[in-house]
Structure formats: C-alpha cells, structure tokens
Amino acid sequence: MSLTYFKRYRMELRLDRVPLDHVSVPEGFALLPWSPALVNHHAAVKFASFAQEIDTHVFPCLGEKEGCKQLMREIANRSNFVSEATWLAVRLNEFSDDLQASGTVQGLQTSAREGAIQNLGVHPLCRNMGVGKSLLLHALRGFRGAGCMFANLEVTAQNTAAIRLYERYGFQKVETLFKVAEVQYS
C-alpha cells in the first residue's frame, strides 16, 4: 500500500443562472423522488456506478455494496438532508415491474443559502444517454425549491466527463483540494 494524493475540484453554481423550469427526462427513463423505500435501489446503483471508478480509492465505501448501503442510510438520516434534491433514475421496462435503477443523486443543505450535490452516479450501461444531466438538473431544482441560492459539489480531477457536464450547466471550479488515500497497486 502507498499513500496517494487525489486532486479534486470544489465546484460552485449560482442557481438563478440555470433555467430549471422545464427539466426533461430521457426517453425510456423515469426519475423517482426520494422515498426511504428506495434506499436499497439508490445504494445498488451507487455501487454499480462507482465500483470500477477512481473514486473508490478516494472513498472506499463506494467500492463495496454494504458500504454504499451504509452511506445512503447516513446521508438520508442527516438533519440537513434535502429530499427534494435526491432522485433515483430508473429504466422503464414494459415487461417487468422490477425497478431497474440507472442513476442516483443526493442533496445536503450545507448552509441556509447552499446545497451540496452528493454522489451523482450513473450506471455504466446508461451513460451518455442524458441520465446524469437529468439527475443534476432535478437536484438543482430541488435545492432551489428548498431556498438555496447556490449549489456546490466535489469531483475528482480525472473524472473529465463529469466535469464537462457540470461546466456545461455553469459550475465553476472555485477550489482545488487534495485527498490522501491508501492505494494498493497490484
């Protein structure tokens, strides 16, 4: 094992600069609002979204099914949890009533004026279909509805696809952070 420093960006956005009145959902998908009954679906898609990604080195719980369940429970039980900014994307299937979770996002309110995006993840088989965009915009609308004026998030610098998405909607890098983690190289 060796200690490795991971570069991360803290990004921020003024919510009044993003049109959020008509936020769409990609064809073949639906977004479900937060419900405690969906916690295991959020955790399962969180695991599928992050298990093979660099973020599992930064946050090891994302690389474990049980770790993702525990993280979801912890986020949902926080006093600053924003249910209106927490969404589960599911793939529609006319042949089955089983939920096919395809993406997740959670929100926390970090001050009276600011919300923080937590763990926006999209299942690898559902990427580049607009699911991430839809989750992001629904979370931002939820923060605005909760009275926030700003939204922020942190993203690992190597996650260029996510950074492009966030910048497309007006997020700007406001701080560079370094997170140290133990990494086992094989």
Image (spheres, rainbow, N blue to C red):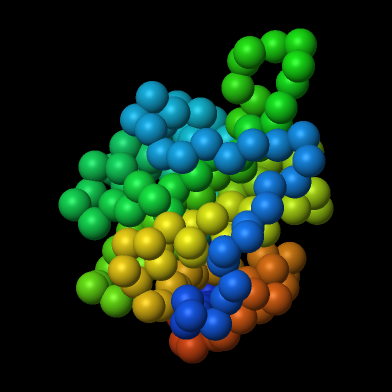
- Residue furthest front as drawn: 21
Give the quarter of the image for residue 7: bottom right
Q: Is residue 47 visible?
A: no
Q: Is residue 72 visible?
A: yes
Q: Is residue 71 above or below residue 133?
A: above
Residue 151, horizontal then vertical, whole percent? 43, 73
- Does residue 138 appear left or right of residue 100 in this picture? left
Residue 35, horizontal then vertical, whole percent? 38, 33
- Residue visible at 60% across and 22% down? 99
Q: Which residue is at the front of the view, 103 or 51?
A: 103
- Residue visible at 34% across and 71% down? 148
- Residue furthest bottom as drawn: 174
Q: Is residue 99 above or below residue 148?
A: above
- Residue visible at 69% across and 68% down? 165
Q: Is residue 76 above or below residue 149?
A: above
Give the quarter of the image for residue 162: bottom right
Residue 68, horizontal then vertical, whole percent? 45, 38
- Residue visible at 57% across and 76% down? 18
Residue 98, horizontal then vertical, whole percent? 62, 15
